Image: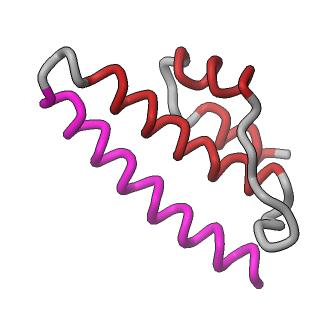
Amino acid sequence: RYADLIEGLMADAERLYAEADAAIASLRAAARPGVWAAARMYREILNEVRAAGYDNLGRRAVVPTRTKLARTLAADGYARRRDVLVR
């Protein structure tokens, strides 16, 4: 039940991130890359919690540097979420 609760909260967060993506597009060009990358990194923490079986109390969700780079450069912010949920 805890995992369901956390997933529900993270689904809400995912919707807010999607709204933020649209807002980021309205920022001046020089500001977009940094804000967009930061949003991707915070969003990726959700995937790390999912990959850890929703154990966010017993361990800290850490996004490895390699994953940070890959997700920042990826065109689809939801790709990894789908991969983790399908397992």
Magenta region includes residue 9 = yes
Give the quarter of the image for residue 64.
Answer: top right
Figure label count: 0
Side (left or right) of 35 relative to 24: right
Query: Horizontal and vertical percent for residue 62?
Result: 74, 45
Quarter of the image with the N terminus in it: bottom right
* Whether residue 87 is situated above or below residue 27 in the rendered picture: below
**Colour treatment of the image:** secondary structure
**Viewer-proximal residue, 58 or 86?**
58
Residue at left 63%, top 52%? 46
* Whether residue 66 is situated above or below residue 23 in the rendered picture: above
Query: Horizontal and vertical percent for residue 15?
Result: 39, 55
Side (left or right) of 27 relative to 86: left
Q: Which residues are magenta?
A: 1-27
Residue at left 81%, top 49%? 51
Characterize the magenta stretch by its predominant secondary structure. Answer: helix
* Whether residue 29 is situated above or below residue 43 in the rendered picture: above
Side (left or right) of 68 relative to 53: left
**Viewer-proximal residue, 19 or 60?**
60
Give the quarter of the image for residue 6.
Answer: bottom right
Residue at left 78%, top 58%? 60
